[in-house]
Image: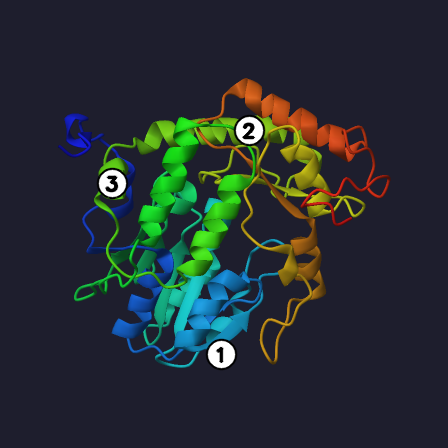
Amino acid sequence: MELDLNAVPEAKGSVWECWTQNYETVCFASPSAALAAWLWNHAITCVWLPVIAPPNYIAPLRRLVACKFYHVGDTFSPPVDFVRQVLPGEGVLTFSWLGRPIAPELCRALVARTDIFWLEDRSQALCTGVESQAGVVLYSPAEVLGVPDGGILVGKVAGFSPVPSAAEKSWGEKRQDALLERFEHPHIDNSLFLREAKIAQEHLLPGGEMSRLTASLLRRLPLASIAAKRKENYAALHDRLREWALWPERNPGFVPVAFPLRLPGHISWEFMATALTRQGIVCPRFWLPSTTGEKISSVEKATDAESKLLKQLFYLPCDHRYAEGEMRRIADEVLRVLSGKSTLGRPGERNTGDAYSTW
C-alpha cells in the first residue's frame, strides 16, 4: 500500500486553501515550468523582470523570450516609471521578495495596464498578507516549505496544462530522495543545498505535474500556526540584530521566509557562511554573489546601489521548525562573527582551505 497520508485529516486554513482559494489553479513540477506555460499560453515574446534576478532564474527565460529589465534600488522596491515603457502584449514579472508584497503604487500602475500580462511571482512567499491583483500568481512550495516540488499558477489559467516529463527520474523525485535522507539523518551541513543545486542544474525546465505527495502535504500544513511561528522567530532575530536588519519592522505584516542582514563591508558572504556552517547553522541563499556587478544583459546591469545590496545581503533562517533557543544561538553566532570573535577570527587572518574560504 502507498504512504497513508490520507489517514491524516486535511487542515482547515491549510497552505493549499489559502493559496488557491476559489481561483483557477494549475500545478506544474517546478516554478520554471509554470512560468514557461504562462508565457506560451499568452504568446508572450518579451518579458520584464528585475535587473538583479539571479542567473538561474534568467537562464530558462532567455531560452524562451526576449528579456527587458527594470531596477529595484537597494530596498527591492521598483519605481513605477518602467511600467509606462512596457509595450502592449508584453509580460511583466514582479516579485514578493522574501515574502514582502509589492508596493501599492506599483500594483495600481500595473492594474491600470489592461493591455499587458502581469504575473506576480510569490515563489519566496508563504503569505504576503495582501490579496494579489495580478492576472496570475506563481507559488513555489519547495522553496518555502519542506516539500519535494511544485510550481502552482493561480488566477486566469484556464486551458493551461503541464507537458509530460521526459526525464527518467523527475526533479521532484530526486528532491524527495534528498529530503527523506535529511529527515532520516538530520545532520546539519550544506550538503543538501549542494545536492539541490545540482538537481536544479540538471532540470532547468522540468516537465510533468506537481507530485501527489506535495499536493497532499500542502492540504495538511496549517498556514496560521506556521506563519505565527515564523514571525515569532523573525522578531527574535530582529531583537538582537536590528542594527544590521534590511527592513526596520520587527513585526511585518507579511510572513518572512528568511531574515535578511546587511553585512558590514569588512565581512563577506563567504566568511559569514563558513563561520556559521562550522557551528551547524546553514543559511538559505536566494541570490548568488556572482551576480554582483556582472553584466546581466547586453545593455543593462545593476546600479551601484543594487550591486552594493547584493554584496551585503545575507539570509538567516527563521523557519517554523526552529525553537526560540535556536534563534538565540543563531543570533549569538552572527554577533560573534561580526565582532571578530568567531572560530575563524577576523576576515583575512587565516585561510582554512574550506570550500567557502575565498576571502
Question: What residue is pinned by disc 2?
Answer: 235
Q: Quadrant of residue 281?
A: top right
Q: Residue 217, percent across and down? A: 26, 36
Q: Nearer the viewer, mark 2 or mark 3?
A: 3
Q: Secondary structure at mark 3?
A: helix
Q: Could you tell whether 307 is left or right of 324 in the image?
A: right
* 175 lies above or below 166: above
* 179 lies above or below 211: above
Q: Estimate the spatial distance between the alpha carbons at disc 1 and disc 2, rounded to whole Å.
A: 39 Å
Mark closer to the chain start, 1 or 3: 1
Mark closer to the chain start, 2 or 3: 3
Q: Estimate the spatial distance between the alpha carbons at disc 1 and disc 3, rounded to whole Å.
A: 42 Å
Residue 85 disc label: 1
Mark closer to the chain start, 1 or 2: 1
Q: How is the image coloured?
A: rainbow
Under mark 3, the amino acid is Leu
Q: Nearer the viewer, mark 1 or mark 3?
A: 3
Q: Secondary structure at mark 1?
A: helix
Residue 96 visible at all: no
- Say few, some or many: other residues with alpha carbon within 10 Å of mark 3 (under 14 / 14 to 19 / 20 or more): some
Q: Residue 100, percent across and down? A: 48, 47
Q: Quadrant of residue 273?
A: top right
- Say few, some or many: other residues with alpha carbon within 10 Å of mark 1 (under 14 / 14 to 19 / 20 or more): few
Under mark 1, the amino acid is Gln
Question: What residue is pinned by disc 3?
Answer: 213
* 299 lies above or below 204: below
Q: Nearer the viewer, mark 1 or mark 2?
A: 2
The N terminus appears in which quarter of the rendering? Answer: top left
